[in-house]
Amino acid sequence: KTFALHVRCRFAFKLLLAVDRAPMFGLGKRPDAAEQNDKPQPPAVLLVLQVDDFDWPTLFKDVKLRDGRAVQVVQTGWKDIQVHCDTYGSARCIVEVMKLAPTASRSGNKGFIERKCMTVKPDFVLVRNEVVTNDFNGKGLLNGFLFADIPSVNSLESILLNCERPVMQGYLHRMNRTLGDAFPVMPQHYASSHSSFMYGYTFPAVVKVGSAHAGVGKMRINDHHQMSDFRSVLAMMPEQSCFAEPFVEGEADLRIQKIGTHYRAFRRIGVSGEWKTNTGTSLMEELPLSDRWRDWVDAAAEMCDGLDILSVDAIVEHGTGKEYIMEVNGTSTGLHPDCAEEDNQHILELVVRRMNEALCA
């Protein structure tokens, strides 16, 4: 028995030795560290918050980051996600996606079944829709991304500030005090509630309630009698602040757009008879960018510690041609349909650059 055990041990030793020496004679190959590192890395996950337009998974289809990783795009909307985070696990942010954007292709999300939840661990976020609208407030979701410190375009801090009209208008008036007539901003009155609403400037006037966009929450007031009536209505909205400013009969609107280092200027003329020149039917044309308009958008791009995507909206007064800056739009700035394909490419290049900076350092 002892002899048999000895023979078996010698045979096992020789077998191990042969296997170990096999690569020397071309009989086998031992995987080295370099080969193990050749395994493809999992893709970087980009969460795109845009539910109304465009197919971002297709746009990013062949994109690679500087470290060779592909980019998996999950496109959805603010209303269709839930966010939870922790500081003790490997995944600092988890997003439950209830529904993908209808415009997004499903090719990169083959495991997703409509009407069932998809769990996503985003490495980067691109925000292209408003966080707060007249019927939805997504600041709780945005705060989750801020808690997890997820990099994004625009920065999450700037997007949070953009949710508050008083903050953004305050930035504009600060620039006006610094730059003077080179940065003309409409005079305004701000009130935190109906109790402090004491407008004492010219009529007709325009009142703006809350932080909604696209003409929502705005009303023209012809005299102090109507203003008194409006003030009584404002009392029914105790959580809402309010702006009032002189009404300017608009000849046209201006929009000065900046995406990264790319600029555009547009002129919009309303043809539907609406006093709100940004509502109803209108004609829009692209114009050559003047130095004055470039200075406006460059100055505004410094707001909130930097805006990568923004537009400055202004109104041209009928009869005088005077231009007044009205507001700044951030990461959710809409694109002109005729320029959208090219501008989305500028956004893609901007996002890839920011992802490389944040994820491939």
Image (spheres, helix red, strand yellow):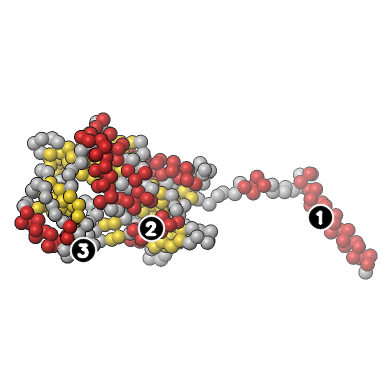
Q: Position of residue 109 (x, y in %)?
A: 44, 56
**Please, what is the three-letter code of the amino acid marked with disc 2?**
Asn
Q: Position of residue 3 (x, y in %)?
A: 94, 65
Query: Which sits in the foreground, 170 or 148?
Result: 170
How packed mark 2 is, by other alpha carbons closer than 10 Å (few <14, some 14-19, many 20 or more), is: some
Kindly indicate the quadrant of the structure image that contains residue 262.
top left
Residues at marks 3 and 2, CA–CA distance in whole angstroms: 24 Å
Residue at the (28%, 50%) spot, across then down: 167
**Quarter the N terminus occupies:** bottom right
| Mark seen at residue 124 | none
Residue at the (47%, 45%) spot, across then down: 358
Residue 105 visible in the current orientation: no
Question: Are dots 1 and 2 in contact, CB under 8 Å?
Answer: no
- Residue underneath mark 1: 16
Dot placed on the residue nearer the N-terminal end, 3 or 2: 2
Residue at the (80%, 48%) spot, across then down: 21
How packed mark 1 is, by other alpha carbons closer than 10 Å (few <14, some 14-19, many 20 or more), is: few
Residue at the (6%, 54%) spot, across then down: 224
Residue 223 visible in the current orientation: yes
Dot placed on the residue nearer the N-terminal end, 1 or 2: 1
Query: Which sits in the foreground, 313 or 204?
Result: 204
Per the image, label 1 sits on a secondary structure element best described as helix
Per the image, label 2 sits on a secondary structure element best described as helix
Q: Where is residue 147 in the image (x, y as percent from the top left)?
A: 43, 57
- Residue underneath mark 3: 238
Question: Are dots 3 and 1 in contact, CB under 8 Å?
Answer: no
Residues at marks 3 and 1, CA–CA distance in whole angstroms: 82 Å
| Mark seen at residue 143 | 2
**Please, what is the three-letter code of the amino acid marked with disc 1?**
Leu
Using the image, determine if residue 47 lies above or below residue 258: below
Kindly indicate the quadrant of the structure image that contains residue 11.
bottom right
